Image: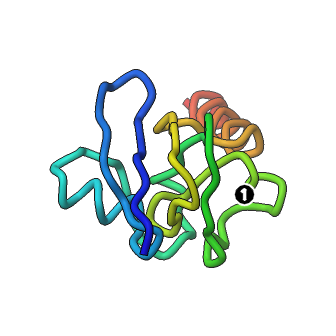
Amino acid sequence: MTDYTVEFVGTGETITCSDKETILSRCLEAGIAQEYSCRVGMCLACTAEIVEGEVTQPAARGFTADEAENYALTCMARPQSDLKLDRGKYPPSIEGDAAKGAGEAFADD
């Protein structure tokens, strides 16, 4: 088992996380308010952009293969190196869907 440092960009928050545990589980243990919902890799609420480093997340079903290269689902992701993550950042495909949904809501009013 290897421990890695996970730094959250812009927050000053840092945790130590082993390669055997998820980033979300360590955040919760450390009292860091990481957003999450389903905890099974589908809802994308716990998404963070990988600024630096690598993760393994074989059960992250909510991402395409390309998205999984640049984004982590913290409920599934286990560090493979020291990391810098930017929480609350979503792949462009997700951002586009969210913006489209918001626009449709206003169009119906």
Q: Nearer the viewer, residue 58 or 17?
A: 17
State the count of labels: 1
Q: Please determine whether, in this image, residue 56 is positioned above or below residue 85.
A: below
Task: Look at mark 1 in the image and give the residue it sits on.
Answer: 68
Residue 107 shown left or right of residue 73 in the figure: right
Q: Spot the residue most to the top.
A: 10
Q: Residue 87, position in %: x, y?
A: 46, 38
Name above or below for residue 41 compared with residue 91: below
Horizontal side of 92 relative to 8 (left or right) equals: right
67 to the left or right of 78: right
Task: Specify the quadrant of the image occupied by residue 97.
Answer: top right
Closest to the observer, 85 or 103 = 85
The residue at the point 73 percent across, 37 percent down is 96
Q: Residue at x 43, y 54 (%)?
A: 4
Q: State how the image is colored.
A: rainbow
Across and down, in percent, residue 11 comes to 33, 25
Question: What is the quadrant of the C terminus in the image?
Answer: top right
Kindly give the residue lying farthest to the right in the view shown: 66
Q: Is residue 81 left or right of residue 25?
A: right
At label 1, which amino acid type do we have?
Answer: Ala
Give the residue displayed 41% in from the left and 71% down from the top.
Answer: 39
Please provide percent x and percent y for residue 107: 65, 29
Helix, strand or loop at mark 1: helix
> Image quadrant of residue 52?
top right
Above or below residue 32? Residue 95 is above
Mark 1 neighbour density, 10 Å: few (under 14) some (14–19) many (20 or more): many
Seen from the viewer's position, the closer of residues 41 and 93 is 41
Quadrant location of residue 102?
Answer: top right
Q: Residue at x 51, y 37 (%)?
A: 84
Q: Quadrant of the N terminus?
A: bottom left
Q: Which x, y percent locates residue 25? A: 31, 65
